[in-house]
Amino acid sequence: MEDTPITQFGAPDAPYCNPETARIAIIPAPLEYSVCYMKGTAQGPQAILAASSQMELYDEELACCPIEAGVYTYPVLNYHGLDHAAALKLTGDTVRNVLAHQQIPLTLGGEHSLSAPVIAAVHERYPDLSVIHIDAHGDLRNEYEGTPLSHASIERRVVDLGIPLLEIGIRSFSPEEAEFMQSKPDVAIVWAYQIARGNASIPWERLSKHTYVTIDLDVFDPGEMPAVGTPEPGGLHWYQVLDLFREICRRSEVVGMDVVELCPMPGQTRADFMAAKLVYKLIGYRLFQ
């Protein structure tokens, strides 16, 4: 593992960043093995942590400082010398360690392929787990560019585990995925165009008692979040995504989260800050909603 910079998510001298008492464990995971368009997600976690140092900690909606409930940032995972499979194993094992300490893992990517081993680890502890995937892309291909470990296949791996899956915000889908969906009743999709036109019906009844939420930042409209590797037009907006997560927290116990696919860009530090603020809002809703 590498050293983690001092941030408000992990300041070593802050009482709310005690690794023994923290309720939320942030895991910076700079994974980048199967990126197929613009590269740079390996720098995503550090950019989020750096931007977090500039945040105000009071949440006006929740009327509190969520971080004071206990947030600890683990050292950045070191994937040097590891192949993709070994890097994914390291990520999953780290989450298992967090869960063993009764903490809620919040993993910062890195590319989206990291979610598969993380979800598998959480599923081991919570066999009734359901997954909500908030993304522009379906990520349901059996494999992509010759590997089943691709970031374009992570939700296919979730389906392989028999975990009920709800995808929200999707607006990029392949013929292979469309064919796959015809035979998979355990997968439901709420399309981005349905949300935009106000006629989306979200099947909340699909949630189990315990839920994992994975958010790919390209779910946002690229006008708000430009710093992603595969931007798609017509995405969701800031308060739409926040409202979704708040409702999830009202209806189910969120036992794991990740925010992935930030691809830092020169001159676009607003995107880094938006990602950091999103992470903080997730923490607040999870602990105080």
Image (cartoon, helix red, strand yellow):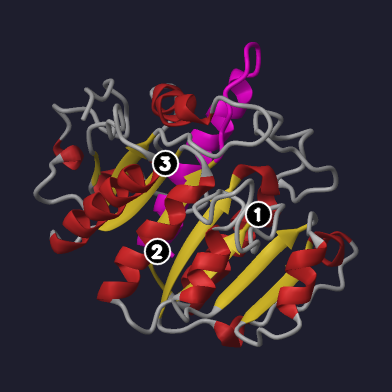
- Name the quarter where the N terminus is drawn: top left
Mark 3 sits on what residue? 108
Is 130 in front, or is 50? 130
Mark 2 sits on what residue? 119
Q: In this view, does 271 lie to the left or right of 76?
A: right
Question: Tags 3 and 1 in contact by the CB under 8 Å rule?
Answer: no
The answer to if 147 sits in the magenta stretch is no
The dominant secondary structure in magenta is helix
Query: Residue 206: percent from the left, percent from the top?
Result: 57, 85
Mark 1 sits on what residue? 135
Q: Which residue lies furthest to the top in this view?
A: 267
Q: SS for tag 2?
A: helix
- x 77%, y 78%: residue: 201
Q: Which amino acid does label 1 sit on?
A: Asp
Q: SS for tag 1?
A: loop
Is 261 in front, or is 52? 261
Task: Say whether residue 23 is visible.
Answer: no
Measure how far apart labels 3 and 1 are at the Cα level. 15 Å
Q: Is residue 136 left or right of residue 19?
A: right
Q: Dot 1, how many residues are within 10 Å of its Cα: few (below 14), some (14-19), or many (20+)?
A: many
Q: Nearer the viewer, mark 2 or mark 1?
A: 2
Q: In this view, does 209 lie to the left or right of 142?
A: left
Q: Dot 2, how many residues are within 10 Å of its Cα: few (below 14), some (14-19), or many (20+)?
A: many
